Image (tube, rainbow, N blue to C red):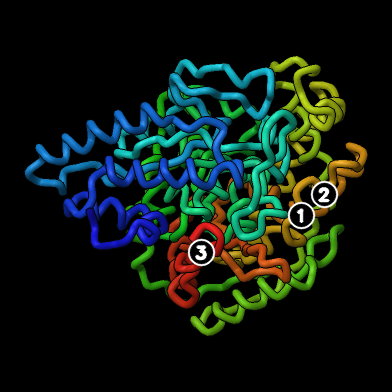
Amino acid sequence: MSSKNHLDLAFTPALEQAKLIRDRQITPLELTQLYLSRIEKYDSQLGCFYHVAHESAIADAQQKTEQLAQTSDTRKLPPFFGVPIGIKDLKSVADMPISYGVPALKEQIATFDEGVVTKIKQAGFIILGKTAAAQLGSFPYTEPEGFAPTRNPWNRDYTPGGSSGGSSAAVAAGLCPIALGGDGGGSIRGPAACCNLVGIKPSRGRISMAPVGDRISGLGTHGVLARTVADAAAFLDVTAGYITGDPYWLPNPEIPFVEATQQTLPPLKIGFITSLLPLGKPTPEYQQSVATIVKQLEALSHTIIPQEIDLTSLIKPFTTVWATAVASSGIPLEALSPMNQWVNTQSGTAGEYLQAVTQMQLFARRLVSLFTQLDVLVAPTYMHPAIKIGEWADLSPEDTFQNIVNWIFPCPPFNVTGQPVVNIPAGFDNNNVPLGVQLVGKPNDEATIISLAFQLEQAQPWSLMRPEKFA
């Protein structure tokens, strides 16, 4: 066993855990047992996991511990050999439940591994289980009916965000060191912001959606929630890459993303969003978060340029496509929540859907053209801090939907453009709930925002912070 105590080990970054295993300071079995015991102790307070894969995780960890003992040169082991991970419920893992947050599907068992899950296994990870998600991934909070709400480890009265809320809460509470998420409109970045984590939505085509199609016109992508920039970058390295038949793809990066953390950046031209029309300015807490990051970037000798972004032409087409994703799920409407049933009514005709896709693409051309003058754009992750659990439960679907738009809409523009984005922690509100700021890169340029995020992380090492009740 490592000289680190169990608590420190639970909050140790995934790459450091992998090194401890290769250095034979700890075994995969000891590490897996540590996380399973923490899940057993704390998850009833948080609701991070819909399924804990206790038996298969222990079996995998025992096999890897035996393999470690028989390996003479541990440098040849996969990069995350023996490190536990959580997988968002919306992602298929063979022989594990996949409910999509629908009560009627709680007992449904997946019959295949998604391509990203295959790569996660090849990288040496041990899957602890399936983390909680908003029903169909539709909402920025994780409270599907028929399941316990997922709570924020920093303040359990508040949401950890959504739809990857289980993944973010689990990493923040030290129930796993890293987790797979998905982002079709902020579903990685929002939870990362709410839980003081690094969350990367990679470029469109960076991580394959195999064996299925994209389903929502390229808005959605797999991604990662982690404690450190290096962990998130290394996760991209092991999960990225073309799989036969992908509808779009990118060339491999010139250097591994994890090496980008060590690159020295030249002075950059960095825009920062002061307001988002027609929504206006974010709340003072979020204005302060952006201002703090901007000040740090200025201290790093980057040129800062204020920006105002107009989303007026995007909101309606984006919400049409968002609604169509619910309509296309194939799940009977009566099995869905009243909110998702209402969202389904907003999807329109096939012709209206195609018109909406075209309008999104025209918006994307205008927004990406801004990056001919900018290297990076800084934006608030949300317009205001996290809401309380159940805060909007008594509102009409129409009012809830408008509240969602008014909260999360700094995120969807970059799903539409397909650009890479990293959420970085950026302070706390008066309720001790974390806040986050987005660093948006040029298309196909994760390296620059990873390097920039790493610079900021050195100035403010957020991974050392832990939610008090779980640390």
Q: In the rendered view, would you say 386 is above or below 291?
A: above
Residue 169 in sight in this render? yes
Q: The disc labelled 1 sits on which kind of residue? A: Ile
Q: CA distance from mark 2 to mark 3?
A: 25 Å
Q: Are marks 2 and 3 in contact (CB under 8 Å)?
A: no
Check contact, mark 1 vs mark 2: CB within 8 A: yes
Mark positioned earlier in the residue sequence (3 or 1): 1
Secondary element at image label 3: loop
In this rendering, the answer to whether 146 lies above or below 296 is above
Q: Find numbered disc 1 in the image and state the secondary structure of the residue it sits on.
A: loop
Image quarter of residue 216: top right
Q: Calculate the distance from the C-alpha at mark 3 to the C-alpha at mark 1.
A: 20 Å
- Locate residue 134: give its quadrant: top right
User: What is the number of the mark on residue 466?
Assistant: 3
Which residue is disc 2 drawn over?
Answer: 391
Q: What amino acid is at disc 2? A: Glu
